[in-house]
Each structure stands twice: as C-alpha cells, then as structure tokens.
Image: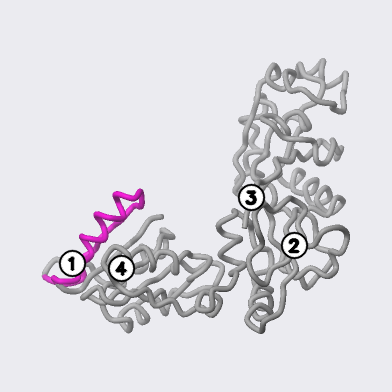
Amino acid sequence: MTIFCICFTKRGQALGERIAAACTKSGDAFSLAIGWGPRKTPLADFTKQAWKKGGALLFIGAAGIAVRAIAPLLESKAEDPAVLVLDENGKYCVPILSGHLGGANALARKVAAICGAVPVVTTATDGRGLFAVDTWAKREGLRIQNLEKAKAVSAKLLSGQEILIQSEFPIFGAAPAGVRVLEGPAPEKADVFVGVHTPKNPQALHLVPRCLSLGAGCRKGTAAKTLERALGAFLSRVSVAEAAIFAVRSLDLKKDEPGLLAFCAAHGWPLETFSAAELRAQAGTFTKSAFVARTVGVDNVCERAAVLGGGDVFVSKTVFPSVTLALGVFPPALHF
C-alpha cells in the first residue's frame, strides 16, 4: 500500500517520521508532507495529488482538517481511497473513509500498533466482530458488481440473521459466524453469489473472481469496434460477466495489431501473445482448423492461447465476423 501522510506540527512530524520508518520496513510506500512552517505543502495540493494517485491518506492533526480537505473530492464508496486521522500525540487513530474497500480499518490498526494508539473503528460489522463481505471480497480479489447490495447483506448479519453464499468455485476454510455456503442447486436463495455467470437471484450481491482469460483471433486490420461487437454478443450468449476477464491472449503475430491493442486498452486488459510453437505445445482437446494451421502455423489460436499456462477451456471457440473468441478458466483458490 502507498500511504500519503501530512502533519501540521513539529510533534506531528516526529510521529509521522516514526510511522514512516515502520511502514517502509514492512514494505509499504510512505510519503510524508510537512503542512507547517515556511516550506509547508499546501493542504489542498497535498490532498488532490494523493487522492489522484489512489493511495491511503493519513492526516496527523484534527479530524476537522481532514474532513474539510477531502469533502470536495468525495465520489463514491467504490472509488474513494482510505482516509485516516491520527492526533499528534498518537493516542487515537480514526479511519473516516473507505474502512473496508479502501482498507482504512486495517491500516488504522497497523498505525495504532506502531505508535501505541487506540484504533477507533466505527463500522458496525467490525464493531460487533461480524463478517464484512466487502472486506472479504477485496482480500480474495473479487470484483463487486453491485456494491449497493452489500448493505442488505450487512443488515441481515447485524439483525442476527444468517446470510447464504452460493459459489461457482470451492471456498476453503470454516465459514464465519452467521455465514452458510449453499451446497447443491439453490442459487435463488443466495444473498451473495460468487461466480463469473449472472446470478439466478437478481437481489444477490455479485462477487466476480478475475479468473478468465479471453483468447482472441482476428483478421489483419480488424477494427476495435468489430472486436467490441463480438465481445458483447459473446458474453451475452454465455451469460458471463466482463469483470471476470483478466487478460486477452493471442498469437504473437497480433501483438502490434492496432484494433486489438485499442480494444484491450479500452477495457484495461493486458494483451498477452505467444508464438505458434508455444501454442502448438499446449496439451488439450481443441477445435482445429486446417486453414488456420496453414495460415499461421497452429490449428487453433483462441482456445490454445486462452488456456496456456494451466487453464481449462471454459467456453470453446466461437466465430464472429473477422473474430474468434474463447474463454479459459484458471480456478481461483478462495478462502474464508
């Protein structure tokens, strides 16, 4: 984690330097800004820059200073970074924003342990020692598709009710108190659905593991919009969430294809390419094409590329105008 800290007194500076040394030693990146004296960093500039970079913000000073500084920048629970306040005497560390998704609660406990402070964590589930589904999702690398549903899940737990989780992949370890994993076909009852497909219960909180690779083949000069149309039709046909895809994979002959590069950039996906020899060496049963073999030296591009490195074919080769797509799955190891 990258931590951006600002202090407003000499005592606060000494405390910040102490925290910086400990955090740096544990592997965190730490930047300490001085908000007092003749060479002080303007508070507004510090806040805007740190906010833009996406790290956690730690204010060593009064809570009101932090509240006024961040107020103009607030966007949403899903987007806002962790924000913490620590008094200059190092007595109380208070996470005031993004306690779960941004990791402010966990960071407050860490900072408190460094300086002997009391972590003042005010989120209800933490206060009662209950399962926090958004914290768990972040830890397990699950993407939350409908964050507004998380409130209903927490409300059930806080009212003493059990929440039901349905998962397309095994979840190892004992379920926390108040949580039961559904076994067998009963997805319509799930409060939380973990998987790459569309939930059967539209009211369920949908958590998506990034475990699918998109194998892609395309003709030379294929435009990004053609790939977009193919992707939309493909995912709709198989009811798979786009958020489950972690990369696009193809033949190395396509590594400089403008349309494919633009398509990947638009989705924030890396383009991973492999030689024909690497693809031919991939074991498995694939949809073969003699024409493709004669043209590029391997009988199938999209399926072989999608599974290279230990995956399995999840959705086999599907043909669209100028484009072929397939999905490979790399099952996640999920734990409570």
Q: Earlier in the sequence, mark 1 or mark 4?
A: 1
Real-space Cα separation, disc 3 to disc 4, in angstroms: 30 Å
* Residue found 60% across the figure and 40% down from its top: 270
Marks 4 and 2: in contact by CB < 8 Å? no
Judged by depth in the image, the label closer to the viewer, 3 or 2, is 2
User: Label 4, on which residue?
Assistant: 45
What residue occupies the far left of the structure in this picture? 38
Q: Earlier in the sequence, mark 3 or mark 2?
A: 2
Q: Earlier in the sequence, mark 2 or mark 4?
A: 4
Q: Amino acid at mark 1?
A: Gln
Real-space Cα separation, disc 3 to disc 2, in angstroms: 32 Å
Marks 4 and 1: in contact by CB < 8 Å? no
User: Label 3, on which residue?
Assistant: 267
User: Label 2, on which residue?
Assistant: 181
Quick one: quadrant of the C terminus? bottom right
**Which span is picked out in magenta?**
10-37
* Residue found 85% across the figure and 26% down from its top: 285
Q: Earlier in the sequence, mark 2 or mark 1?
A: 1
Real-space Cα separation, disc 2 to disc 1, in angstroms: 48 Å
Judged by depth in the image, the label closer to the viewer, 2 or 1, is 2
Q: Amino acid at mark 3?
A: His
Real-space Cα separation, disc 2 to disc 4, in angstroms: 47 Å
Residue 13 numbered mark, or none: 1
Question: How far across and down, in percent of the image, does residue 288 sit?
Answer: 87, 24
Residue 184 numbered mark, or none: none
Q: Is residue 308 magenta?
A: no
Q: Residues within 10 Å of mark 3 (few under 14, many from 20)?
A: some
Judged by depth in the image, the label closer to the viewer, 3 or 1, is 1
